[in-house]
Amino acid sequence: MKLSFHLFALMLFFLDNGVSGVGSDKLSVSVMEGDSVIFHTDVKRNQQEDIKWYFSDTRIAQISGDLSLICTDVQCNEGTERFRDRLKLDHQTGSLTIMNITNTDTGVYELKIISSRSSSDKIFNVTVSGVSAAERDEMKRKSVKEGESVTLESEKTKSPNDVMTWYFNETEITGDQRTICTDDQCKERLRDRLKLDNQTGSLTITNTRTTDSGLYKLQITISDSSCSITIMKRFSVTVIAVPGSDLSAAAVAGIVIVVLLMAAVAAGVFYYHRRSHTPVPQNDEDVNPHSGIQKSFDGHRTSLNQTQAEAANKT
């Protein structure tokens, strides 16, 4: 819903530009609360230009040609604190950025460019539509099992002038369509596991790991020569660990081989130990321990027979 509003507002913006004609000094811009807006000056500053920005006739930003005066918000006018550190002035072009715009920022913004030879004005009529706190803080949540793939959808079709940038835990991981993972740490963590859809800008993470869990942000900048609107989408990704999934098949096979080798070594040591403690037979009694008992029994029987014979002779 929110994205549809952005597209509709941008269409109105372009149509308004077309009706007003090329070089029009008045532009209408519709944005949603929470977005960021950049008002372009369409000039490259030189030493002879002063650039001043006004909101409802109150000066909110200025940069002088010799850079002796650069101010935004309260620095320019002590009586204005409406924006409270939400203004950013480009020192090279004089373009003005309003971050995290609110519905109280609705109104007329005026740009004055003054040089020694000429001066020009440009007016931006800005309408900010409010959204609920729940919608503004909306975060899509994704939960996958380790090893699966997860896709973070941009929910739009990318236009040639759109710029989409993905961030992971505040680190940029994609720039233009030709660059994925520019950060060294990102290269190691997400190497060869990111796929970027060139038509929509959606990002797919393949073969997910628990270290991929965290906050992902998609920054979409819709641009025109006079104005840019930046939309931020957020995704919370949780990768659930699967028991044993952190071991590859090769690692498991290696562990099995090691266990078998250890078992074989243990069996060999046990056999050797038992063999070395078994006495070597020296005589028949060692070979057959019962033979000694048998001989003793035969000797007693012979003595008994002799005693009985002697007693019989005496009788």
Image (tube, grey):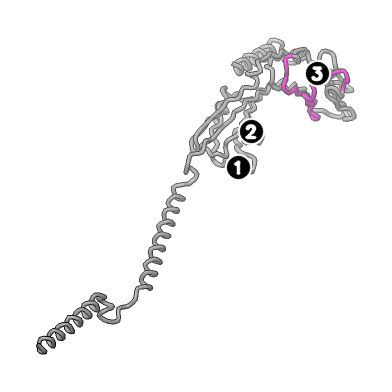
Foreground: disc 3 or disc 2: 3
Query: What residue is at 13 percent from the left and 88 percent from the top?
Result: 310
- Is residue 51 among what the camera can see? no
Q: What residue sits right under mark 2 in the picture?
A: 167
Query: What residue is at 42 percent from the left and 56 percent from the top?
Result: 259
Instruction: Give the mark, 3 or 2, whose residue is nearer the N terminus.
Output: 3
Local secondary structure at mark 2: strand
Q: What residue sits right under mark 1 in the picture?
A: 187
Pointer 2 local density, CA inside 10 Å: few below 14, some 14–19, many at least 20: some
**Depth order, front residue of 192/278:** 278
**Depth order, front residue of 46/254:** 254
Q: Amino acid at mark 2?
A: Tyr
Relative horizontal placement of residue 9, taking residue 241 as reference (left or right): right
Numbered marks: total: 3
Give the CA distance from mark 3 to mark 2.
29 Å
Instruction: Give the mark, 1 or 3, whose residue is nearer the N terminus.
Output: 3
Instruction: Give the mark, 2 or 1, whose residue is nearer the N terminus.
Output: 2
Q: What residue sits right under mark 3 in the picture?
A: 82
**Residue 172 lies in magenta, yes or no?**
no
Local secondary structure at mark 3: loop
Q: Which residues are magenta?
A: 76-103
Image location of residue 66, percent across then percent down: 89, 30
- Is residue 301 among what the camera can see? yes
Q: Quadrant of residue 30?
A: top right
Q: Do the numbered discs 3 and 2 sit on residues whose CB atoms are within 8 Å? A: no
Image location of residue 228, percent across then percent down: 70, 22
Q: Quadrant of residue 97?
A: top right
Give the CA distance from mark 2 to mark 1.
13 Å
Name the outermost residue toward the top.
19
Local secondary structure at mark 1: helix
Q: Amino acid at mark 1?
A: Lys
**Depth order, front residue of 192/281:** 281
